[in-house]
Amino acid sequence: MKDEIEFAQLRERMVATQIASRGIEDKRVLGVMAKVPRHRFVLPEYLDSAYEDHPLPIGEGQTISQPYMVALMTECLGLKGDEKVLEIGTGSGYQAAILAEISKEVYTIERVENLAERAKKVLSDLGYENVKVIIGDGSRGLEKEAPFDGIIVTAGAPILPKSLVDQLAEGGKMVIPVGGSFSQALLLVEKEKGKVKTTSVCGCVFVPLIGEYGWKR
């Protein structure tokens, strides 16, 4: 069993070899990727793989994303520290922890109850008081807390959900995988003066976004 010093060393190596070397430049993102203990969010049987360059299963057919993809999606939001952020697809809670470190408040929605409860416990144990975990259909967003300065979707949608675009604040940014059930394009969606601008960032592969405005199981 590795100790916390060894895990910290693995995080530093992860940032250097998997993230910074691939072009992630935001110093706040690099710093938080080196800080948040990813090993706390993986299942015990994958502990030794916590800082490797690939996704890992977390149960219920879901995964914790590849570290590089977490960093890339976070950098796309351009967070400064005072934002309200919505995450669709809590999963392990790792992405929510990353967001919580560099934004004011995070709302994260997970449709699978036991994943939501596990993530809530880990986030609480690590002292993240600015994250609220909600069980529900993330494809609908969270209208009662809208608008959001940033929205991050960690599951692939068949089309860009209007529900989420509508909940994006003026000047806000959303990053979302859109495409087929086996591969998608990672899109950066920006709302400026009421108009929506969409830019393709890269190709990606995410589990499907299940819900009213996503895939129908």
Image (cartoon, rainbow, N blue to C red):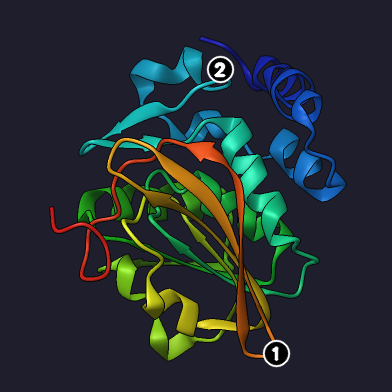
Do labels 2 and 1 touch, CB within 8 Å?
Answer: no
Asked which quadrant contains residue 215, the reply is: bottom left
Between disc 2 and disc 1, the foreground one is 1
Left or right of 175? Residue 159 is left
Left or right of 41? Residue 100 is right
Amino acid beneath label 1: Lys
Label 2 crowd (10 A; few <14 / some 14-19 / many >=20) = some
Return the residue at label 2.
52
Q: Which of 60 and 44 is in front in this view?
A: 60
Return the residue at label 1.
193
Placement of 91 over or under 132, stated as above or below: above
Q: Which of 39 and 146 is in front in this view?
A: 146
Say whether residue 203 is visible: yes
Amino acid beneath label 2: Glu
Left or right of 210? Residue 151 is right
Residue at position x 39%, y 78% from top? 162
Placement of 43 over or under 120, stated as above or below: above
Placement of 90 over or under 164, stated as above or below: above
* Whole-percent x, y for residue 115 in the image: 29, 48
> Total of numbered circles in the picture?
2
Placement of 6 over or under 30, stated as above or below: above
* Whole-percent x, y for residue 212 in the image: 21, 70
Q: Nearer the viewer, residue 166 or 115?
A: 166
Residue at position x 31%, y 55% from top? 116
Asked which quadrant contains residue 59, the reply is: top left
* Whole-percent x, y for residue 204 in the image: 48, 37
Label 1 crowd (10 A; few <14 / some 14-19 / many >=20) = few
Residue at position x 48%, y 77% from top? 165
